[in-house]
Structure formats: structure tokens, C-alpha cells
């Protein structure tokens, strides 16, 4: 399973990368705005931290403009993946960008049918949003399970990138389902590291060691 970090904060990305947790990065306009930096600067810097795929999202909503933006984004670095919102114009753009050899990540996917359409258009990755579905009382992970199953049934090459991850349990469930990738906020990566019994065990071992040494 590949781990992407869902962040436009280069300090977080460097920290996660140092720990071996970064196979790629996803950003979105909200995360880039939060970084307070220019879109181009931040994406270019992220692309120097990892050689893995780095998703950069288009802002246009018309197919031709999305393609133009996508082609420009793909020139920023070899590992840029163009993130396109799920909509009809988006699918036209995905098909065109794919034909030009540019990788795409179809974002804001909330149903298995949207995921099938993205795969048919040739998306490299599809991003089902788990947390936002949970927020409105749906079962986000059940939707991911359906997408993975459908892609397997028909051998779609599109990778399932579980997005809108809110906690460690989402990761465990995504891994059990067999999703290809999960994109994870750094805070959740840190939550996954710890367990009270691990902390207690470390403290105990150290106390026993010091006792044995008469300290
Ligand atoms: C994915 O690529 C998105 O950036 C992200 O996972 C959205 O998550 P949110 O619902 O926590 O904003």
C-alpha cells in the first residue's frame, strides 16, 4: 500500500518523508491557500522533496482550459500529476491529458459510478473522499470497498487513492480492503504511530534498565 501525504506544508512533507511515510503527495487549493505560498513555488518545492507523484489541482471548470492548465502544471516537474474534479468537462480533460501522456488524479469522487467513469476516461488515479461522505451520514469506506471491487472485476488500471482520511481507523480499513493508496494528513500519520502501551512499555524498560545499573 502506498502512503501519500495530504499537505502543502513543506515542513510536514519533509518530516513525513524522513520517516519513510511519503510515496507521494496530494495537494488541493485549500491546502495551498493555507500554506500562504504561491501555487507554483510550493508545488515545485514539494517535487524536490519526493520523486513520487505530486497532485496539483486545476482551477478551471471548462475542458479546454483544464487541459491548458494541466499541460502547464505537468511542465513544472516530471512527477506532477494533474488533479481534475469529477465532472463532464473534467472527463474530457482527463481523456485529452492521458492521450498526451500526462498523469491525472480525478478528485471529489463520492460514488462508485463516478469512479467507473473516471477509469473509463483513463484516469491514472481516482480519489474517493471517505471523511466527507461520513460527515453527511453515509459510509465512506463502503464506497471505497465497492470501487476496489468493481475495478478488480474489470481489471481497470486506475489506482484507488483513498482521500479525505480523518483518522487511523480509515487507514486500517483502506488497507484491509486493498486500496492502492491512501493520502493522509500528517496529524493522522502521527496518531497512527502512538499507543499508550507502547509509551508505557518504553518507560518501563528504561526504568528497569536504570534500576539494574543502580541509577
Ligand atoms: C485529497 O486529495 C484531498 O486533498 C483531501 O483528502 C481532502 O480531504 P478533506 O475532506 O479532509 O478536506
Image: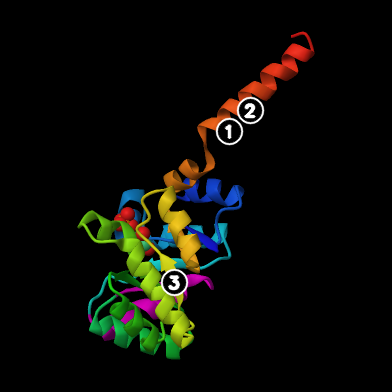
- Callout 1: few (<14), some (14-19), or many (20+) C-alpha neighbours within 10 Å? few
Q: Return the disc, 2 or 3, that comes first in the chain's sequence.
A: 3
Marks 3 and 1: which is nearer the front? 1
Q: Pointer 3: what residue?
A: 160
- Asked if labels 1 and 2 touch by Cβ distance under 8 angstroms, the answer is yes
Q: Is label 1 within 8 A of ligand 1 (CB to nearest ligand atom)?
A: no
Q: Pointer 1: what residue?
A: 198
Q: Nearer the viewer, residue 101 or 40?
A: 101
Specify the quadrant that holds the N terminus. Answer: bottom right
Determine which quarter of the picture holds residue 66.
bottom left
Measure how far apart labels 2 and 3 are at the Cα level: 37 Å
Residue appearing at x 79%, y 13% in the figure: 213
Is residue 144 positioned above or below 87 on the image? Answer: above
Specify the quadrant that holds the C terminus. Answer: top right
Q: Is label 2 within 8 A of ligand 1 (CB to nearest ligand atom)?
A: no
- Magenta residues (range): 62-85
On residue 202, the disc is: 2
Give coordinates of residue 142: x percent, y percent.
34, 65
Amino acid at each position: 500500500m502506498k502512503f501519500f501525504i495530504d499537505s502543502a506544508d513543506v515542513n510536514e512533507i519533509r518530516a513525513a518523508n524522513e520517516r519513510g511515510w511519503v510515496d507521494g503527495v496530494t495537494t488541493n487549493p485549500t491546502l495551498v491557500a493555507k500554506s500562504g505560498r504561491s501555487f507554483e513555488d510550493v508545488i515545485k518545492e514539494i517535487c524536490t522533496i519526493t520523486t513520487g507523484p505530486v497532485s496539483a489541482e486545476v482551477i478551471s471548470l471548462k475542458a479546454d482550459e483544464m487541459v491548458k492548465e494541466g499541460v502547464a502544471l505537468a511542465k513544472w516537474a516530471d512527477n506532477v500529476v494533474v488533479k481534475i474534479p469529477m465532472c463532464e468537462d473534467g472527463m474530457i480533460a482527463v481523456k485529452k491529458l492521458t492521450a498526451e501522456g500526462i498523469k491525472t488524479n480525478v478528485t471529489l469522487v463520492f460514488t462508485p459510478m463516478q469512479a467507473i467513469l473516471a477509469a473509463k476516461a483513463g484516469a491514472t488515479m481516482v480519489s474517493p473522499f471517505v471523511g466527507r461522505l461520513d460527515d453527511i451520514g453515509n459510509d465512506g469506506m463502503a464506497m471505497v470497498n465497492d470501487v476496489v471491487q468493481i475495478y478488480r472485476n474489470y481489471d481497470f488500471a486506475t489506482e484507488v487513492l483513498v482521500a479525505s482520511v480523518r483518522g487511523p481507523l480509515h487507514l486500517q480499513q483502506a488497507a484491509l480492503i486493498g486500496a492502492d493508496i491512501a493520502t493522509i494528513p500528517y496529524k493522522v500519520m502521527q496518531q497512527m504511530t502512538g499507543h499508550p502501551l507502547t509509551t508505557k512499555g518504553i518507560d518501563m524498560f528504561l526504568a528497569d534498565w536504570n534500576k539494574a545499573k543502580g541509577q
